[in-house]
Amino acid sequence: MHSAAASSGLKLASVSLSLGTRQLLTIDETIPQGCVLTLMGESGSGKSSLLDFIAGFLAPAFTAEGKIVLNGRDITDTPPQNRRTGLMFQSPLLFPHMTVLGNLLFALPAKGLTASQRRAEAEAALTEVGLEGLGERDPATLSGGQQTRAALMRLILAQPEALLLDEPFSSLDRARRQETRELVFSIARQRNLPVLLVTHDPEDAEAAGGSVITL
């Protein structure tokens, strides 16, 4: 009998990426819910392109084979907006024309919630990451660490089923980096999300605490 546990998590089934005639990587891994798989390797090894493939944004210059299965759903050919994957980049990419709270409200599904309920949920998310009272601020006035935390909660409020992290701590200073790493991985575990982390930093991999693949 096919158990729920067997179908949960993010499964990369015989996935390979190529650029022209050059094969960049092959991977056949399952990331259980609440766990982190870290990918390390030189620039150009295909790490970020793998995240793009999983999220549905692979550039046309690349070709990919294999299947992506998320919690039992084959999402290989699913439109990006329906995949339920959350992608974080090196830069927080908060919308500059919105307040911090407006950024979170943008991500929060409107279905079934009143405007006041949506606002309360977004404000609770800010409080969860130590940004209470900063909702009306311009994102540009936040520190780098604060912007990363706001971007994380914007991502979480969109209700992803997996997190894809592309060097999300690299722009932070050393002190903020450790604090932010711990926060991101803690929230992912609390929400039982499988996480695929791309990084050059061995300390990121150590903090993630999961398996590490070096390309």
Image (cartoon, rainbow, N blue to C red):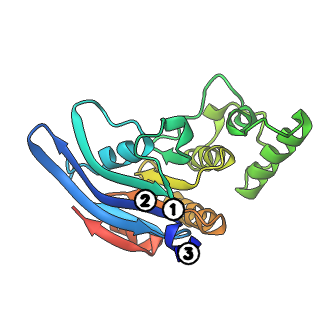
Horizontal and vertical percent position of residue 195: 48, 61
- Judging by the rendered image, the residue that carries numbered circle 3 is 3
* Element type where label 2 sits in the image: strand
Alpha carbon of mark 2 to alpha carbon of mark 3: how far? 23 Å
Instruction: Name the residue carrying label 2.
Output: 196
Neighbor class of circle 3 (other Cα within 10 Å; few <14, some 14-19, many 20+) is few
**Tag 3 secondary structure:** loop
* Residue at which label 1 appears: 175
Q: Is residue 31 above or below residue 172?
A: below
Residue depicted at 54% across the width and 68% down the height: 33
The residue sitting at 52% across, 73% down in the picture is 2
Which type of secondary structure does the marked residue at label 1 adopt?
helix
**Image quadrant containing the C terminus:** bottom left
Left or right of 142 on screen, residue 166 = left
Which of disc 1 and disc 2 is earlier in sequence? 1
Calculate the distance from the C-alpha at mark 3 to the C-alpha at mark 1.
Answer: 42 Å
Q: Residue 147 in the image: state x and y as whole percent.
A: 60, 43
In the figure, is residue 95 to the left or right of 45?
A: right
Q: Amino acid at mark 1?
A: Ala
Work out how far the residue at label 2 is from the one at label 1, CA to CA, in angstroms: 23 Å
Q: Can residue 119 be spotted in the picture?
A: yes
Closer to the chain start, of discs 3 and 1, is 3
Q: Within the image, what quadrant is residue 64 found in?
A: top left
Drawn side of residue 37 relative to residue 3, left or right: left
In percent of width and height, residue 76 lies at 40, 46
Marks 2 and 3, the one that precedes in the sequence: 3
Report the number of numbered marks. 3
Name the residue at 55% across, 75% down.
Answer: 3
Which of the two discs, 2 and 3, sits closer to the camera?
3
